[in-house]
Amino acid sequence: MANMGPYENVKENFSWSISEKELGYHNGEILNIGEYCTDRLCRMGKKDKLALIWEGFGGDVKKYTFNDMRLLTNSIAHFLKGLGLEPGDRICLFMDKVPELYFGFLGILKMGGIAQPLFSAFGSDSLITRLEDAKTAAVITQKKHLQKVRNIVPQMPYMKHIIVVDDDGSKPLKEREIAFHMDQAERIEHFDIYPSKAETPSVLHYTSGTTGKPKGAQHVHYSLIAQYITAKYVLDLQENDIYWCTADPGWVTGTSYGIIGPWVNGMTQCVLDSGFKAETWYKFIEKYKITVWYSAPTAIRSLMKDGDEIVKKHDLSSLRHLCSVGEPLNAEAVIWSKKVFGLPFLDTYWQTETGCIVISNYPGMTVKPGSMGKPFPGIDATVLDLKTYEPIKKPGIVGLIALKPGWPSMMRTYWNNEITYKSKFKNGWYICGDRSSIDEEGYFWFVGRDDDVINTGGHLVGPFEIESALLEHEAVAESAVVGKPDPVNMEVVKAFITLKPGFQASKDLDLAIMNFIRKRLSPLAMPQEIEFVDSLPKTRSGKIMRRVLRAKEWGEEIGDVSTLENDM
Ligand code: WT7
């Protein structure tokens, strides 16, 4: 039986206090996510239950019980404190999906630090933008990523420590660098966990917008209340489940539902630290008898592309519940998964800023393939008129997805950027920045983003960050970056570029610019296509109109161009 009862009943009677009660939390008390995910579970008799089954790309396997996790997160917390790091310090996790990333996250929270996870494929430019904004005090990283940190160390006087988790002495460590080996560290039985309260900052996740630099969505320990109950109801996590979240903790899915949600529910989770390959993924499910699987549309479409035959070669009968997040889950993918796995992927919708699933399909609810489902009980969601910001009463009309503020895991601000944070609210609603309609039965149907942010394979990339980096290339005079359609990744980055005098468009220059961005920012931000143009469409005030370029890529109506200065 599913954890969540019939939707309408639950919605009617829901209150976040149900979650508080189940967690034994009372208003005003100490609340520390690190404690709740480790020590509390041990006290509840789960000491010897497996918390993490980890497999590396080379096939090596590591397993940790809840007690191992309790002790190792203590060791990390103790080590960080010993370095002089203090509560409130931002501590960045810059690693592949190794156990140290997961336990480091909880260790930081246990000593009162603010965990700042960053995607390990980021290059030095992406890194410095986010570390500079947060004035990060320490980075925990791996040897293979150390050079990217070293490149920018001179620009970071506030950075006190660079902790290397797999140092083997082959490269001498430099000033400010220090080795820490989790598996060999002393296991600390008693660590004085920082007595955080509900509103104590916990996690800082950077996300991209249309304009300006990436923004740090700042979360607090109270997010646990929402992450616990959404993981329980939507992911339907139950005692004997073996859970697999394919997301990287560099992004919010990988922390809210790849660390906090499953572990506070006492789940055994599996982590696969290797790239995407259908064969590897199916083998992983088969080997560990995964029951609940949380993934993303791009991955599902990639699996679809690899065909049904390969599915049949594996015994995937352990699977019982599948969910998806990050981008629109097309109806074909839902229908295909029903056909080959016997289970539809259930779409869930949320954001870095919301901290938890806010619109979703639920076990037992009728799935309408292509729809995102209905608001989570406890979430008041609607669509607002594009101009007046008033809730749209009529079904089927496209508006802005908006949420009534006040759920536990909502970001509390953007780090250093209260102005942008405030601009996200209109008429008492939090505006998500996406467009949707709602049908007669209350199902949300996603339409698209309301800004220029590009969603590539479930990862948001800001055009501004790419355009700024492009300007650093010697050949680039001006650029405009938009998303272009892609069958697997939904969108990929396309750059329109005007060249400086003396530079000629060529295949070589094309590749050189692509690589320039890949190295500085990340493979996600790398343009998959570059079009050299003589001029870019601009408004009379000189602002580049990405909208016009984007509409062309998507074969859409260009819309109002009355302020357009030059003809395309
Ligand atoms: C944006 C948030 C939170 C998970 C990872 C992404 C898009 C998210 C869906 C969905 C259509 C979706 C939206 C949203 N998005 N889920 N089910 N259907 N679009 O977090 O990086 O903050 O991105 O991803 O545009 O605003 P994020």
Image: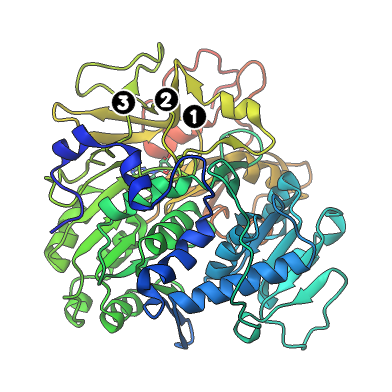
Q: CA distance from mark 2 to mark 3?
A: 27 Å
On screen, residue 522 above or below 162:
above
* Left or right, residue 103 beside residue 324: right
Who's the residue at 87% across and 54% down the image? 157
Mark linked to residue 547: 1
Q: CA distance from mark 2 to mark 1?
A: 7 Å
Circle 3 — which element?
strand
Mark linked to residue 382: 3
Circle 1 — which element?
helix
Q: Earlier in the sequence, mark 2 or mark 1?
A: 1
Amino acid type of the residue that numbered disc 3 sits on in the rendered structure:
Thr
Who's the residue at 31% across and 25% down the image? 382
Closer to the camera in the image, 333 or 443: 443
According to the image, what is the colour scheme of the structure?
rainbow
Amino acid type of the residue that numbered disc 1 sits on in the rendered structure:
Arg
Closer to the camera in the image, 391 or 339: 391
Find ligand 1 in the image and state its quadrant: top left
Q: Which of pointers 2 and 3 indicates the residue nearer the eye?
A: 3
**Residue beneath label 2, please?**
558
Amino acid type of the residue that numbered disc 2 sits on in the rendered structure:
Ile
* Left or right, residue 364 beside residue 459: left
- The x, y position of residue 473, in whole percent, is 74, 50
Mark linked to residue 303: none
Disc 3 residue crowd, few under 14, some 14–19, many 20+, Cα 10 Å: many
